[in-house]
Amino acid sequence: MKDKNKFYVTTPIYYATARPHLGSLYSTVLADIAARWNKLLGKKVFFLTGTDEHGQKIAQAAQKAGMEPQKFVDSFIGDYKHIWKLYNIDYTRFIRTTEPEHVKAVQEWLTKLLKNGDIYKSKYEGWYCIPDETFVVEKGDQESPLCSMCSRATIFISEESYFFKLSKYQDKLLKFYKDNPDFVLPKERLNEVIKFVESGLKDLSISRTTVKWGIPFPGDEKHVAYVWADALLNYLSGVDYNKDQKNLEFWWPADLQVMGKDILRFHAVYWPAFLMASNLELPKHLLVHGWIKVNQQKMSKSLGNTIDPQDLYNAYGADAVRYYLTSQLAITHDAEFSTQELEHRISTDLANDLGNLLNRTIALAFKNDLFEVPEIKKWSIEALELYDYSVATINEYHDHMQNCSFHLALASLWKFISRVNAYFHSQEPWKITDKEKFNEVISATCHSLNVIGHLIWPVMPHKAIELLDHIGQEDILDDNVIQELKKKWNNSFKLKKGTTLFQKIEEPKVMKEIEQEKPLSEPNINFEDFAKVKLLVGTIEQCEEVPKSDKLYKLQVNFGDKGMRQILSGVRQYFKPQDLIGKQGVFVFNLAPRKMVGLESQGMMLFVEDANGNLQFVTVAKEVPNGNPLR
Ligand code: MSP
């Protein structure tokens, strides 16, 4: 019988091509919060993070830096560990894919699959995206297709390769998704995975002969393992796959695997299929978050718009940034990073709502010579109502944390904080002369702060301990803390004066490093530049799925006396054909024709992102003749 009281959580392993940026920190903080929450629940926790160190992307980056790949990747490990320490990331193991133990595990795994026939040798011909280290599913006939994930240029490769029989697992995967609708959190993201699998899985090339920086393929050292096959295995080698069976059995399957939406396909399709082929259980949940954007673009090393967590730490401290990342950036959405918003949150939520509540309570108690708040024997109705509210909050918080809706958990906790502030004010304790009544108000507030201090610990571990220390609470991780917090209020509190928990931001901090990376202003164009783009209105007469692609629609668009045109548009996940057919849209008419999946696209349809990250098409308020230009 398995020990159910365990929680195994992982982050993606980060490409060791640069220092960690705010996007890397985001995935890691989410995993750390889940780990700490489960510790609060009294579980044994294993938290794995690390670095992805093989493959073409790394080899190229090392070459550019004029370094040996191993030395190159080694040079970033200190940075990762340093930043994780600053941000109180309490990982159990930091794994590197160049570690001999991991290399051995991958080779043994490949050998096993070679033996059972799930891996075979053939030839790969097609397009490859180096930044994403991915084989491009849409095969272009002549011209290079852009990567369907990142829209960057791809390269053509033609080489002998080992293949994993991914196609064999198509039906099994679909059944698994059906039986486990909450495999992917938030649930909505599973739909795109199902669509991708339903569109047909081809066998996956899992070795390269033209790349040297990788794990030698067992028995055929001309090949190295495809970097994603190597990297995904870290989740197993991290808990001693093929090394310590007992340890593996204890921790596997992973309970939660955290990742950004860009790498969901690898984790929700390839990874489960690898596990099925290895007769291993599948992870319980994948937690998928959106992107942090800067100036509307995904923050990424290649775009050079990254924000350094070290700068944020220096300016605001770890816990405030952790709070901002969790409360402001809802997991379900992409969100624009903003120092103004971060500063606003620090001043209002943290300094005003929470910090002041603690300060005022302690200052007032001390002013009235109350240093030890005694146990209260009989509570007033108002205090009992506050107690009830605290229990309801704990339950709500618990449910949201279990669903990994961390931003909702914090929202309900902050509702409680407002409620406690309202209670404190309504009682006007500064006017109370009756000692017992005064003690009661301070005690009810301290009990509330005790609940708040424990519940914020997963998100703000240092500040939580500081807060609890002010009210004399030391043992955070008592068994069954959550149940304890719901018990009838009967604590006494030893109060301590201390430093202010959070400082209001009076003067906005100008973060040079961030400002420098933003363009000072959008460059202007003159009218001639604008006039070069021919924007015409047309009616979509037909809309069909392109069979070789999971994203593209083939549109037949009527431009009136300028004729019909075929236009390809990668918007399948946002619209059904009937949403588009018969509608007027705006098109770039004079864009040079481009070939995708062997079909020519003779223009481009315009869309805009809405508040939920979905696309809306651009149209006219009233119907106009087809082919009319925008001016
Ligand atoms: N090495 C692969 C993962 C292999 S896991 C077996 C990889 N590495 S990465 O360094 O490019 O990205 C790691 C994580 O950082 C991903 O979860 C990714 O979504 C996240 N982020 C990178 N940039 C990001 C933002 N701008 N915003 C939020 N998270 C993003 O992919």
Image (cartoon, grey):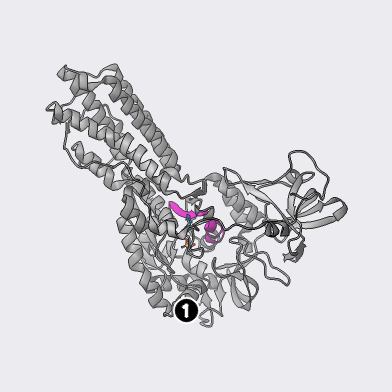
Task: Work out whether 464 lies above or below 533.
Answer: above
Q: Is residue 59 left or right of residue 204?
A: left
Residue 255, image x, y percentages:
43, 51
Given the current orientation, which residue lies at the most extreme right position? 561
Task: Work out whether 576 lies above or below 437.
Answer: below
**Of residues 348 and 535, which is closer to you in this image?**
535
Q: Residue at x 14, y 26 (%)?
A: 368
Q: Secondary structure at mark 1?
A: helix
Residue 456, image x, y percentages:
33, 41
Query: Which residue range is magenta in the image?
Result: 252-271
Task: Work out whether 101 lies above or below 274.
Answer: below
Given the current orientation, which residue lies at the most extreme left position? 369
Residue 434, image x, y percentages:
16, 16
User: Does the numbered disc 1 mark a residue whose Cβ is under 8 Å from ligand 1?
Assistant: no
Q: Is residue 400 left or right of residue 534?
A: left
Res 482 seen here: no
Disc 1 residue type (three-letter)? Gln
Q: Residue at x 77, y 60 (%)?
A: 602
Res 569 seen here: yes
Residue count near mark 1 (Cα–Cα under 10 Å), binned few <14, some 14–19, many ≥20: few
Residue for badge 1:
63
Q: Is residue 263 magenta?
A: yes
